C-alpha cells in the first residue's frame, strides 16, 4: 500500500455520552464536519482520543466507526499506544485490518526504553502491521526521547512512512527533515509550532486545535505548504490565544470543553481526566471570540 501523509490531520477526540459510553452518533457528526471543513486525514485513538481509557473492543469500534463515516473521503490513521511491544504488534494486526490507511504508533511510555529498544519496538510493529505506520514521538507524555538518528534509521524501514513530531524542538525537526529518505513525511504534533515547522520543511500537522477550528488549521497548513507564509502567519497569530487555552489543562480536557460550548459533544471524559475548570472555560470562550469562531457576548 502506498500512502503519502501530507496536510492537516485531526487527532480526534472520542465523544462520550452522559453515561460514559462512546457516543457513536456524535463521532460520526464530528467526522463529517471535519471533512467538510477541509481536513486532509483523521487520527482516532491517540492521546487526544483518550485511547488509554478505551478497552480493546472500544478502540476497534471507534476506528471502525471513523473509517465507515469517512467513507474513503480522507485517509484514517489509527492510533496505537501500547508500551508492550507484543501488545502493540497484536493491536496493529487488528486495527490495521479495519480499513485504515496507516497506523500511528507512539513511543512506549513509562518503561523508558533505550534507543535500541525504541528501534526494535517500531521495527517489530512495522514488520507485523498490514498497513504502513507513522511513528509518534511525544516526550512530554512518554518520558522517552526518540533521537533524530534513531528516527532516521527507522525511516529507512519499508513500512515506516512518517513521524509525528511533538518534541517542541525545531532542531529535532530540522535534523530529521534534512536527512530523511525520499518520501518520508515529517508532521508537526504541536499546534503552536505549525507555521515554523512548515517553514523548516515539514509536511503538515496532526492537530488538537483542528478538533475545534478545522478550517483555520487546514488553511494555515495549505498556505504554509504553498510558501504563502504571510497569510499563514496572520492566521497562526490569530490562533495564539486559542491554542494556549486548549493546552491550559491536560489535552483533551479543554478541547472537549470547547466542542461542548460549540454544541458538538457532551463534556464528558473518563477518569482520571475530569472536565475543565471554570477558569479554563473563561479562557476558551474569550479565545474562541478572538478567533472569530463564536460571536462576542453582548
Image (cartoon, helix red, strand yellow):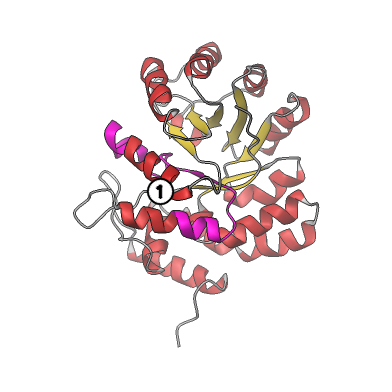
Horizontal side, residue 73 vs residue 252: left or right: right
Q: Which residue is mark 1?
A: 250
Write the residue at 71% across / 65% down.
Answer: 234
Query: Is 42 or 244 nearer to us in this picture?
Result: 42
Q: Residue pushed farthest bottom?
A: 298
Does the segment drawn in magenta span residue 23? no
Secondary structure, mark 1, is loop
Relative horizontal placement of residue 157, taking residue 84 as reference (left or right)? right
The residue under the point 49% across, 75% down is 294
Left or right: where 166 falls relative to 283? right
- Give the residue at x 72% y 59%: 232
Task: Name the image quarter holding the N terminus.
Answer: top right
Residue 51 locus on image (x, y percent): 36, 38
Please tell me whether residue 48 is drawn above or below residue 248 in the rendered image. Answer: above
Observer able to see residue 26: yes
Residue 15 spot, x, y in % from top left: 33, 53
Q: Is residue 98 above or below residue 247?
A: above
Q: Quadrant of residue 266?
A: bottom left
Q: Quadrant of the C terminus?
A: bottom left
Residue 280 visible in the current orientation = no
The residues colored magenta run 31-59
Please indicate whether residue 174 sits to the left or right of residue 80 in the image.
right
Residue 252 location (% of width, % of height)? 40, 50
How many numbered discs, if any?
1
Is 30 or 200 nearer to us in this picture?
30
The residue carrying pointer 1 sits among few (fewer than 14), some (14 to 19) or many (20 or more) residues within 10 Å by Cα, namely few
Amino acid at each position: 500500500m502506498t500512502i503519502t501523509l501530507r496536510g492537516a490531520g485531526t487527532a480526534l477526540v472520542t465523544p462520550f455520552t452522559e453515561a460514559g459510553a462512546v457516543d457513536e452518533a456524535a463521532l460520526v457528526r464530528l467526522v463529517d464536519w471535519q471533512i467538510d471543513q477541509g481536513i486532509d486525514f483523521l487520527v482516532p485513538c491517540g492521546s487526544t482520543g483518550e485511547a488509554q481509557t478505551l478497552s480493546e473492543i472500544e478502540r476497534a469500534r471507534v476506528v471502525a466507526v471513523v473509517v465507515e463515516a469517512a467513507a474513503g473521503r480522507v485517509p484514517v490513521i489509527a492510533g496505537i499506544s501500547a508500551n508492550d511491544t507484543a501488545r502493540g504488534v497484536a493491536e496493529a494486526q487488528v486495527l490495521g485490518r479495519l480499513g485504515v490507511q496507516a497506523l500511528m504508533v507512539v513511543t512506549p511510555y513509562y518503561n523508558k526504553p533505550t534507543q535500541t529498544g525504541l528501534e526494535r519496538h517500531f521495527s517489530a510493529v512495522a514488520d507485523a502491521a498490514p498497513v504502513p505506520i507513522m511513528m509518534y514521538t511525544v516526550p512530554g507524555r512518554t518520558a522517552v526521547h526518540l533521537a533524530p538518528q534513531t528516527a532516521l534509521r527507522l525511516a529507512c524501514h519499508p513500512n515506516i512512512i512518517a513521524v509525528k513530531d511533538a518534541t517542541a524542538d525545531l532542531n529535532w525537526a530540522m535534523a530529521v527533515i534534512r536527512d530523511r529518505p525520499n518520501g518520508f513525511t515529517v508532521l508537526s504534533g504541536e499546534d503552536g509550532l505549525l507555521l515554523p515547522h512548515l517553514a523548516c520543511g515539514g509536511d503538515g500537522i496532526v492537530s488538537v486545535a483542528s478538533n475545534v477550528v478545522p478550517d483555520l488549521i487546514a488553511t494555515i497548513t495549505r498556505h504554509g505548504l504553498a510558501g504563502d507564509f504571510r497569510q499563514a502567519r496572520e492566521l497562526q497569530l490569530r490562533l495564539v490565544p486559542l491554542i494556549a487555552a486548549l493546552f491550559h489543562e491536560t489535552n483533551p480536557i479543554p478541547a472537549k470543553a470547547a466542542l461542548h460550548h460549540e454544541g458538538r459533544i457532551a463534556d464528558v471524559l473518563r477518569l482520571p481526566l475530569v472536565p475543565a475548570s471554570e477558569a479554563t472555560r473563561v479562557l476558551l470562550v474569550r479565545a474562541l471570540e478572538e478567533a472569530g469562531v463564536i460571536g462576542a457576548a453582548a
